[in-house]
Image (cartoon, rainbow, N blue to C red):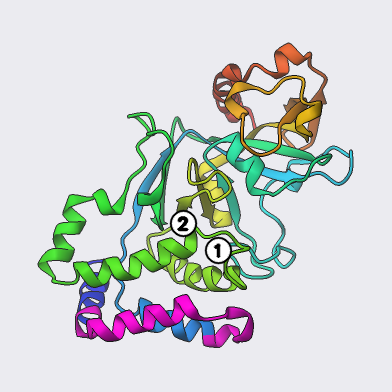
Amino acid sequence: MANGYAESVKRLRRINSGELVGRINRIRRMDASKLTDMAIRNRLGRVMDGFAHKTMLLATNATFRARVNVGSESFRHVRELWYPPEGVARRGRFNGDGQSVFYSASSMAAAMWEVGAKVGQRVTILACGSRGLMAEVICAQIGVHLYEGKPQPSELPLSNMRADSLFQRDLEEDKIDRKWRLVDDLLSELATAHETDIPDLYRITSSFGATFRRIPTSEGITYPSVATNLKAFNSVLSREAADKHFFPAEAWEFEILNWSSAAHIPVDLRSKLEPIRPIRRTKNIRIDGTIEWAQESPEVMNDYSSLMPRIAEARASLQFR
C-alpha cells in the first residue's frame, strides 16, 4: 500500500491543476451513450491516474438484500436471493454486464427502494447476518462524506475518508490534497447520481468501480444510497467477501401499495415513496438453502424490534450448519 500510495502521489503531483480541471469538466459534459466503453475508460483513466485511495473498515452485524418477486410467487431457495450466477447479472452501478457481485444495503428500507419496485409488485428482503459478532469488511468508499443518515452506533462506526485526519494530513504533506478533492468530488458526484440524470450513468460508474475493486486490500465498495436520498448506505462486495462475512438469516416478503390502500405503515419503514405491507417471513432457512415460509399475524409481522435478536439466534445456530 505504501509503495502504491507513493507512486500515486508522484503521478498526481505531476498533473497540471488546470489540465486536471479540464479533464474533469470533459467527463461532466460527456454523453456516455455516444461513446464506446473503451473511450469512457480512457477519459476516466486520465482523471483517476494518480488518485490515491485507501481502504476503510466497514463494521456491521447485518446487511440487507432485496429482489422483486415474479408475480405473486415466493422464492423457494436462498440462492435466488444471494448473489446471481456469473454471466447472468445485469449491469449495475458498480458491476458490468454478466459480472456477479453482492449488493446490499444498511437497512431493510434502503434495500427495498434500491430495487425500484412498483405499486402492486412484491419484494423479498433477505436479512444477512454477520458470521461473527460483527463483520469487519475492508472497503473502498466513494461519497461517504455525503451520507445524511443517522450516525451509526458507536460500536459500528461508519468511517469517512475525509474525516480521517491522518489520511488528510498525508495528502496535505504530499501537496496533492486539492487535486485529490477535485477527483474525489467527481467520483462522489457520479456515485450518488440518479441513473435518469446522466446518460448511461452505469457505464461510467461500473468503469471506475472496476478500478476501485482492483485495490489489493479491498473486498468491495461502500457508498450512500441514492434511493433513500443518501439517508442509508450500500455496499457492493465480491462474492468471496459475501460468503466470508455473511450468512442468510431470514427473509421477509412485502407488497408495494398505493397510499390509498395503506391501512398501516410500519414506523421504521415509512418513506416518501410508496407504502408497503408485510406478507410473510421465513420460519426457517434450512441447511441446504431451502426457504420455509411461515404465516404470521400482522402484529407479529410488524414487530421489527425482534429482528436483530432473531439474527443473533440464527448466528448461534451456524455451528450446526
- Is residue 122 found left or right of 232 in the rendered image? right
The answer to whether residue 127 is seen in the rendering is yes
Is 16 included in the stretch rendered in magenta? yes
Q: Position of residue 33 (x, y in %)?
A: 63, 80
Q: CA distance from mark 2 to mark 1?
A: 8 Å
Magenta residues (range): 11-39
Name the residue tied to disc 1. Answer: 94
- Determine the residue located farthest toward the left in the rendered image: 173
Query: Disc 2, disc 1: CB below 8 Å?
Result: yes
Could you tell me how many numbered marks the image carries? Answer: 2
Residue type for callout 2: Ile
SS class, disc 1: loop
Q: Position of residue 15 (x, y in %)?
A: 24, 85
- Determine the residue located farthest toward the right in the rendered image: 72
Residue type for callout 1: Phe
Is 231 included in the stretch rendered in magenta? no
How packed mark 2 is, by other alpha carbons closer than 10 Å (few <14, some 14-19, many 20 or more), is many
Disc number for residue 221:
2
Main structural element of the magenta stretch: helix, strand or loop? helix
